[in-house]
Image (tube, coloured by chain):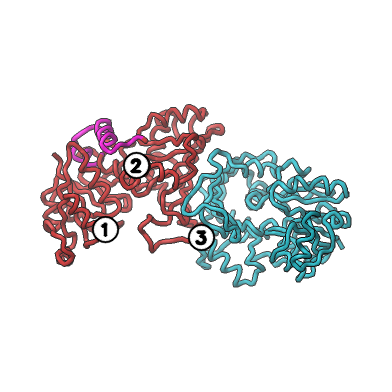
Chain colours: A red, B cyan
Amino acid sequence: MIQVAINGYGTIGKRVADAVALQPDMEVLGVAKTRPNFEAEMAIEKGFPLYAAIEDRADQFAEAGLEIAGLVDELIADADVVVDATPSGIGAENKTLYEDHETPALYQGGEDADIADVSFNARSNYAEAIGVDHVRVVSCNTTGLSRVIAPLREAYGVEKVRATLVRRGGDPGQTGRGPINDILPNPVTIPSHHGPDVETIFDDLDIDTLGMKVPATLMHMHSLNVTLEEEVDADDVRDLFADESRLFLIPERFAIDGSGKLKEYAMDAGRPRADIWENCIWEESISTVGRDLYLFQGIHQESDVVPENVDAIRAVLGEADAETSVETTNETLGIGL
Amino acid sequence: MIQVAINGYGTIGKRVADAVALQPDMEVLGVAKTRPNFEAEMAIEKGFPLYAAIEDRADQFAEAGLEIAGLVDELIADADVVVDATPSGIGAENKTLYEDHETPALYQGGEDADIADVSFNARSNYAEAIGVDHVRVVSCNTTGLSRVIAPLREAYGVEKVRATLVRRGGDPGQTGRGPINDILPNPVTIPSHHGPDVETIFDDLDIDTLGMKVPATLMHMHSLNVTLEEEVDADDVRDLFADESRLFLIPERFAIDGSGKLKEYAMDAGRPRADIWENCIWEESISTVGRDLYLFQGIHQESDVVPENVDAIRAVLGEADAETSVETTNETLGIGL
């Protein structure tokens, strides 16, 4: 059994822990947190050993009545692999800790690409991460773009990608963020970082991205244009996407008009935390004009990287090939709406 | 003096009336409204003769203590030109009224293009509307796109336009509209109607547009890509746009990050109703990658068509050429932030 440490137990960390616990070949060795809160209490309730991420603050857990298993240092020492799910920038500070213990580490997409030897998306470049000690699982938006671009490149060739990413201002629990009642070009300068980030997955791709922020919390929405190398019928693209396990084509008959109904659907389907691990592509939106392909897709910022982290664990440890890993992850999580 | 009737005194009609009243060559002969409300009262306060748009409801004005000058029929009969600023679809119903009185009529962009002989944007095709009896002033978004496309076509040639229009869910006063906390592909199908609408101005243009709706009320935001026929420096495009009177280039030093600060700026500048008649283009966003030009622009949905309506009045009556009309309109309104 692969012993997995999870450093950082917030939005991503807690989801990765739950997903790891479902894998037949993995165990949650422990989760590390900087301070006690409801998530820390629930980690203990779930039976995940809880470690203090900051020695100076370890007492706070006892004061809050929470028993910790030790300090993060011990957790990393004992683990086969660590998933760093700390806030952007903290992963870079943690790298020496992982190096000191020679524990292979996964970082999240908020870190700079150069923190790792490989940036990872299971569908696009799983094999590149096999046996690599420092791997970065790309961000939710980059994951969402890569999952669509990979099959298009293989089937038709891609001349250029242009995407406008209309991003949720914050997650539902991030009450201090904005905007309210506004549409912000964000960043104002072009391209946004997402284009170069996708190029860490496909190094020869021509892609320009533009970002905005709006007063919504549920999901991101991509307006995607891909100029293909050949003219293709929209129906063929639909068929291509239908074969991809992590692309969910929203059927017209569902009458799902946006993120709200998508999350409602996920809740009705019994998904944990109403998570949507798949890209949500409106089937009707898939259109072609000459070699230009267009579509809308919703990206659940809190969860689409979760299966990718699980696959990356197997990749860095060389425990499975891409197909086997993705199949196991999909089956255990219940991916495939 | 051109005697102008304004049929419909809501968001657009009241602004057009104020703008007409400022013109040296025009007079507001009267405004027509279906029912009394605060806007009807203010029309009278401003000295605009108020007409009942629906005979059966004329009594309501008296009941509300408002003196009307007559029925819309009389107003149209006496006017040199009528600006129809009624809700989408009502303009089409009104067309026979205008024809019966042989009064040249302007319609708004919410009407189908085939209501009129010419779709109008002052910068792009003023001359086509000269002496034409039925002219449609295109919508706020189409106006915003046309103002940018016209100079680019003239200076460099345009191969293709791709635009994502992130639209405000409703105007500030439209309390019954949504979405709240969502990002809706709208329409889900591609292209949105905006692309074909821009083609009513430039009939040989290749343009694909995608629309979304978000929980904001202040302005629309365009993520615009124009593939030019030649490679151009972004600085040259900035210079080109700086010469356009209805394009406002937001300087970086203003630290304006979105619609909220833009409207705040318009209020500080003493603009009536904080109207922003110009396209608001973030100067830093103007970028080129090979022949691809990108930019973000904010479009004030309530007011950018107002100067266009004023110019269209002069065009249909053949009272001035484009340059003279635009200059007069700009000067009287105070266009040029």
Q: Earlier in the sequence, mark 3 or mark 2?
A: 3
Asked whether A324 falls inside the magenta stretch, the response is: yes
Tell me: residue A319, above or below residue B314.
above
Question: Circle 2 — which element?
Answer: loop
Question: Residue A90's mark?
Answer: 1
Check the residue under mark 3 and report the chain it is in: A
Which residue is found at the position 18% from the left and 65% from the top? A64
Cα separation, mark 1 vs mark 3, equals 31 Å
Amino acid identity at mark 2: Trp
Magenta residues? A311-336
Question: Circle 3 — which element?
Answer: loop
Residue B110, percent across and down?
68, 48
Question: Circle 1 — which element?
Answer: helix
Amino acid identity at mark 3: Asn
Asked whether B120 falls inside the magenta stretch, the response is: no
What residue does disc 3 label?
A181
Amino acid identity at mark 1: Ile
Which quarter of the rendered picture does the C terminus of chain A lie within? top left
Residue B235, percent across and down?
56, 56
* Secondary structure mostly taken by the magenta-highlighted segment of the chain: helix
What residue does disc 2 label?
A277
Cα separation, mark 1 vs mark 2, equals 25 Å
Check the residue under mark 1 and report the chain it is in: A
Image quarter for residue B159?
top right
Residue A221, percent across and down?
45, 47
Counting other residues with Cα less than 10 Å from the Cα at mark 3, is it few (<14), some (14-19), or many (20 or more)? Answer: many
Counting other residues with Cα less than 10 Å from the Cα at mark 1, is it few (<14), some (14-19), or many (20 or more)? Answer: some
Which residue is found at the position 47% from the left and 39% from the top? A160
Q: Is residue A293 visible?
A: no
